[in-house]
Image (tube, rainbow, N blue to C red):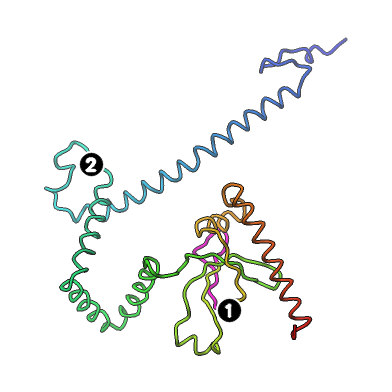
Amino acid sequence: MSDLSSLAPDPLGGDPGKPAERSGLMGRLRTYFLTGLVVAGPLAITAWLIWTVVNWFDDVVTPLIPPMYRPESYLPWPIPGTGLVVALVALTLLGFLTANFAGRKFVELGEALLNRMPIVRPLYRTTKQIFETLFSKSGSSFRKVALVQFPQPGMWSLVFISTQPSPEIAQHLRGEDYISVFLPCTPNPTTGFFFFVQRKDLIELDISVEAAMSLVISAGMVQPDGGDGQKKLAAMAAQARATQAANVAKTIDPVG
């Protein structure tokens, strides 16, 4: 007697004799789901980060605003982002006031007072130097990307070029042309290695800091966009191989 269960109708509406069609349907559904996840995931994370920042500013700044000036005092609901707008206006006004002579004198007086505090002085100086370096228009901090052989010869890592070493440090580097670089770790780029390296040992790359950061965070899964990015990566690899070959040649024949 034949097995009647083999002739039972397919709940998906397909032919029971064609399991490949069922697997094909499941594959398409999986593709649709992953496509929707790729589209919605970044949007959701971006919206969540923006909402978190806006709420943080609201929680910090809004209590400092007198109740009579808050929008919720006149509207039936609060307006998100009020604290962020007030903070932006206040920082802009602060920059305008400190740009004139009286403002600079007031800032110098405050800094002189902070410099007399033993514990506060190093913390304030370090924080100020970091902010001045990051937001300086003329500075070269983290505006270029390079390759350096790390952790051993033949292995190349992405680094961000920082600034020239200070005179106190440069005098101990025997007059060589050194540059300070930061090598971020994957997937957390806020941790890494900071060291001084000779400029001749660096291979500067023609890619943006944002593209290099995406490459580091994704562990190489997110490559530079477009065909030009792939060509740049190929050029990077060729340049690294050429540099390595030149170093090997110098080791074999140091006179040449």
Q: Is residue 173 magenta?
A: no
Q: In the displayed structure, would residue 182 be above or below residue 92?
A: below
Which residue is nearer to you in this view: 104 or 37? 104
Give the residue furthest to the left: 68
Q: Which image quarter: residue 38?
A: top right
Q: Position of residue 115 (x, y in %)?
A: 27, 82
Q: Position of residue 118 (x, y in %)?
A: 30, 83
Q: In the displayed structure, would residue 175 be above or below residue 227?
A: below
Which residue is nearer to you in this view: 34 or 98? 98
Three-letter code for the amino acid on which mark 2 is drawn: Pro
Which residue is nearer to you in this view: 232 or 115? 232
- Find residue 78 and name its label: 2
Stretch of the chain drawn in magenta: 184-197
Q: Nearer the viewer, mark 2 or mark 1?
A: 1
What residue is drawn where x is 53% and y is 72%? 181
Three-letter code for the amino acid on which mark 1 is drawn: Gln
- The number of discs equals 2
Give the residue furthest to the right: 1
- Relative to 137, is 248 on the left or the right? right
Which type of secondary structure does the marked residue at label 2 adopt?
loop
What residue is drawn where x is 39% and y is 70%? 133
Q: In the displayed structure, would residue 8 be above or below residue 85?
A: above
Q: Which image quarter: residue 217?
A: bottom right
- Relative to 51, is 184 on the left or the right? right
Quarter of the image with the C terminus is bottom right
The local crowd at label 2, few if under 14, some if 14 to 19, many if 20 or more residues have their Cα within 10 Å, is few
Q: Position of residue 222 (x, y in %)?
A: 59, 50
- The residue carrying mark 1 is 198
